[in-house]
Amino acid sequence: MSAPNKSYDPVEVEALKPEEIERMRDEALAAFAAADSLDALQEAKVAHTGGTSPLALANREIGALPPHAKADAGKRVGQARGAVNKALGARQAELEAERDARVLVEEAVDVTLPYDRVPAGARHPLTTMMERVADVFVSMGYEVAEGPEVEAEWFNFDALNFGPDHPARQMQDTFFVQGPKGADSDGESGVVLRTHTSPVQARTMLDREPPVYVVCPGRVFRTDELDATHTPVFHQIELLAVDEGLTMADLKGTLDHMVQSLFGADMKTRLRPNYFPFTEPSAEMDMLCYVCKGESVGNPDRPCRTCSSEGWIELGGCGMVNPRVLTACGVDPEKYSGFAFGFGIERMLMFRHNVEDMRDMVEGDVRFTRPFGMEI
Ligand code: DAH
């Protein structure tokens, strides 16, 4: 900026003449009015209010005026710039309002339009539940092992210490694919649809050297009629650990860990003596009711539907692998011991998610599966 010049006549400074200032202001106002979009307005803004706009340049000239002329010129330029900024703000608001109104129309979603997409399906909750349980053990270092659904009678019963006349063999009403072995058969093994996942225990032990740590999910079959609480095809998950020095305490700790992983850190299990031919000792395993945590027992004011106010929910069977089974599967019972357990997935799904009718699980209706989602 040049130094004040006392002999300078303001009237001679072209850019500060009143009509010049008015012209600059009017041009700016006209440019804003003509801007038909926010982009165009932005350009007009730079041109008419930016650092090199005519009004900004005129403003700079004020400094060079003699003191007596400064106030007058400053007032004129200031008023013009004020008017320009006001017009700019008004136009900006106008254009923004137009844009918002347009976007509302252009981007509107008609939520009443008919639904024409193929609805997303969902994984079956039995599958996700099995994977979830298996994952608990995989994270502890167990491997997933599988066996055939059409199984030799030997694996399903004999290898597991069910004698030919053993009552348990009749207890499990079995689909025979090829003749039952029975007490008076010629010794040939029949072929069955496996009645439990326990034969995978025998197959695994024959297949690999100890230590063995496997989890075996799968489908099993019994000749039950389909009703609210029975289905001839259902799912079990089996666990087998064979190693040196395993005890019932390892079994108990493993069961507790499983229910804590699946139902919460304050969960626990309890064992009740029972009999299975392939485990000795054997036990029925219950888990604490995850809903009432046992508080409903003897407490009529707080009944629990999940455990019928028993405080415990029966899960399945377990025990230490019978040494006879170890021997039949080529494992030295003097050196190794093992524990096993097995339970039904349908039952777990029923009490965990209040599914009241097992038929819902087999009918394949997506309205049943969809609420369970895509959990992997
Ligand atoms: N297989 C048995 C059943 O289907 C359940 C079972 C009981 C599995 C005890 C085991 C076990 O591994 O140790 O009823």
Image (spheres, grey):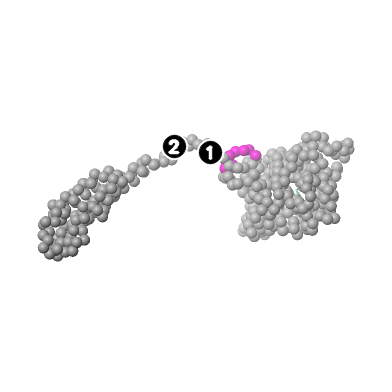
Residue type pointed to by label 2: Leu
x, y (%) of residue 290?
Answer: 64, 56
Residue 40 rendering spot, x and y as whole percentages:
28, 45
Quadrant location of the N terminus?
A: bottom left
Instruction: Identify which residue is drawn at 79% across, 58% down.
Output: 245
Range of residues picked out in magenta: 362-370
Q: Residue sitting at 21 percent across and 55 percent down?
A: 57
**Do we see residue 317 in this rendering?**
no
Q: Indicate yes or no: mark 2 CB to ligand 1 under 8 Å.
A: no
Q: Quadrant of residue 283?
A: bottom right
Residue placed most toward the observer, 216 or 222: 216
Residue 106 quadrant: top left
Q: Residues within 10 Å of mark 2 (few under 14, many from 20)?
A: few
The three-letter code of the residue at mark 1 reads: Pro
The residue indicated by pointer 2 is 113
- Whether residue 205 can be seen here: yes
> Is most of the magenta stretch helix, strand or loop?
helix
Q: Residue at x 21, y 46 (%)?
A: 30
Neighbour tally class for label 1: few under 14, some 14-19, many 20 plus, Cα within 10 Å = few
* Residue under pointer 1: 119
Residue 245: mark: none
Disc 1 to disc 2, C-alpha distance: 15 Å
Give left or right: position of 57 versus 141: left
Query: Magenta stretch containing residue 365, yes or no?
Result: yes
Q: Earlier in the sequence, mark 1 or mark 2?
A: 2
- Is 187 part of what is drawn in magenta? no
Viewed as shown, does residue 151 lie left or right of 188?
left
